[in-house]
Amino acid sequence: MQPNELPKINMDTAETGCCPKFDPAGWDGQEIVFDKRLFVKAHTRSFFHFPLNLGAMYRRVCGKIEREKAGLKDAFLVLSHDPSPWRGESYFAVGKDLPGEEMVRLSGTFRTKVFEGEFGEAGRFHREMAEYVRSLGLEPKRIYFFYTTCPKCAKHWGKNYMVAFAEV
């Protein structure tokens, strides 16, 4: 893949009116390079890594992305990272700056691995991702998760995929 390129997501498969059906093909075991990839950075309050205001934050940011027509064509990516048990960070990939939002550009090389399971298993998946990256002879700097569907859509689709992105 070229720098800043992401595997495609068919946004037309959102029969729930929310999240499109996620196809893990093309996401597992990839090397993805970001070269000043543009993101909106948003924060959540958490209680032992459980986000307390995630829904409100998503509605606000996704609504603004839609109103400003800043979404990506054929792609959707939100990287989540918890710098502490009390705070979460979400990075929404966008195609242009959004006024009034914290904009960041991420650069680096990332290795990916797809996991399927409950949201509560993210801690175990984080450990498995670190082991996977080390098995490649690399050292993970920071691990992000792309939660591909909301809980309602995961129930609808019968699968709950998460893609771990390890910065190496």
Image: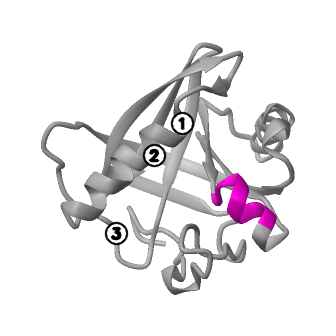
**Residue beneath disc 1:** 54
Name the chief secondary structure element in magenta: helix
Q: Which residue does the image show at 45% across and 46% down from the upper left?
A: 58
Is 124 colored magenta in this rendering? no
Q: Within 10 Å of the Cα at label 3, are there few (<14), some (14-19), or many (20+) other Cα atoms?
A: few
- In the rendered structure, the answer to whether residue 126 lies left or right of residue 166 reads right
Q: Nearer the viewer, residue 149 or 134?
A: 149
**Residue beneath disc 2:** 58
**Residues at discs 1 and 3 in contact (Cβ within 8 Å):** no
- Residue 130 vertical position relative to residue 92 in the rendered view, above or below: above
- Residue 78 vertical position relative to residue 95 in the rendered view, above or below: above
- Residue 139 vertical position relative to residue 14 in the rendered view, above or below: above
Residue 115 in the image: x percent, y percent? 81, 55
Give the Cα distance between marks 1 and 3.
Answer: 21 Å
Q: Is residue 93 visible?
A: no
Q: Which residue does the image show at 80% across and 31% down from the upper left?
A: 123
Residue 37 in the image: x percent, y percent? 32, 52
Q: Which residues are magenta?
A: 148-155
Tell me which amino acid carries mark 3.
Leu
> What quarter of the picture does the C terminus occupy?
top right
- Quadrant in the rendering for residue 141: top right
**Residue beneath disc 3:** 72
Q: Nearer the viewer, residue 122 or 150?
A: 150
Q: How is the image coloured?
A: one colour
Q: Earlier in the sequence, mark 1 or mark 3?
A: 1
Is 150 colored magenta in this rendering? yes
Give the Cα distance between marks 2 and 3.
Answer: 16 Å
Residue 125 in the image: x percent, y percent? 82, 40
